[in-house]
Amino acid sequence: MNYNKKTYYEKTRNNLNLVFIKLALYLYLSLRLKLTLSIVERPNFTSNISKLKIVFATNNPNKLKEVQQLLPSVEIVSLQEIGCFDDIPETSNTLEGNAIIKANFVTENYEFDCFADDTGLEVDALNGSPGVYSSRYAGEGSDSENNMRKLLTELKNKQSRKAQFRTVIALNLKGEQHLFEGICKGEILTEKQGKKGFGYDPIFKPSGFETSFAQMTMAEKGTISHRGKAIKKLIEFLNSINN
Ligand code: ITT
């Protein structure tokens, strides 16, 4: 009798242990699943722009920072966050073409809605150069210092120093493509001024201002810049489809 009682208690205790183990396992697995789902959740255009998540296809961390500041109501997802570490080839000879290539690369290979921009510095006296070749003006793999030095040399004996930055944004959204353009007119200075910004900022002075882009804060530059203007059009478009 005692033996049976003991066995009965042992069995009950073992069963209870099993139930607790199963419960703990269930809780652990459901938590893991929830976490995984939240990590792989795709950028999703909802009816409320404040909840918008979108991939920005750029490998330029300065551009990413600028756009993040210009779009505080949108959650910008970087290429790294979607696991894209490719060097996207910019093979077009137009800004429009390259913006489209970058945006399409992400949509086709990673199935995300996304946007990409391509920007060029177009100098009047150089018939629009460096334009689409701005990042490699002084040769493949050249840095901003070399590019600026080459531009200043090319402009040494030129009368006009008029130039403009032009940005084209390609947005891939729900199977449709939309383009937005922003232009900032100005002139090329004779020497570098300021340390902020990136690229050609130290030698570009926007019209109506006494300082170069590199002497402005990121927010100041954003209110008048080519990229700022293109992003403003992008925001207006996103607002229009969400209302
Ligand atoms: P992604 O293609 O990965 O976006 P990128 O640096 O190649 O980055 P772009 O092709 O759009 O960017 O720009 C070409 C070059 O033009 C860039 O490397 C800079 O030197 C210059 N540039 C672009 N935007 C600029 C800005 O706002 N101010 C100064 N220079 C800029």
Image (tube, grey):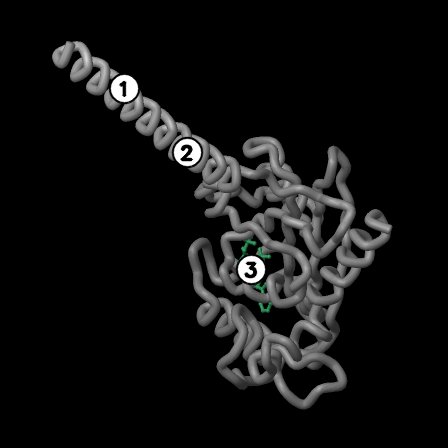
Locate the N terminus and report the quarter of the image it occupies. top left
Amino acid type shown at disc 3: Leu
Identify the residue at image location x=67%, y=90%.
210
Identify the residue at image location x=45%, y=32%.
30
Amino acid type shown at disc 2: Leu
Q: Horizontally, is 90 left or right of 146 in the view?
A: right
Q: Is residue 93 visible to us here?
A: no
Looking at the image, tell me whether mark 2 or mark 1 is earlier in sequence order: 1
Q: Position of residue 71 (x, y in %)?
A: 67, 62
Q: Residue furthest front?
A: 1
Q: Position of residue 242 (x, y in %)?
A: 82, 49
Return the residue nearer the eye: 171 or 46: 46
Kindly report the distance in space between the C-alpha atoms of the residues bearing marks 2 and 3: 38 Å
Which residue is labeled 3 in the image? 64
Number of marks in the rendered image: 3
Which residue is labeled 2 in the image? 27
Residue 240: which numbered mark, if any?
Answer: none
Kindly report the distance in space between the C-alpha atoms of the residues bearing marks 2 and 1: 23 Å
Identify the residue at image location x=56%, y=39%.
41
Amino acid type shown at disc 1: Thr
Tell me: residue 88, above or below residue 49: above
Kindly state the secondary structure of the residue where label 1 is placed.
Answer: helix
Which residue is labeled 1 in the image? 12
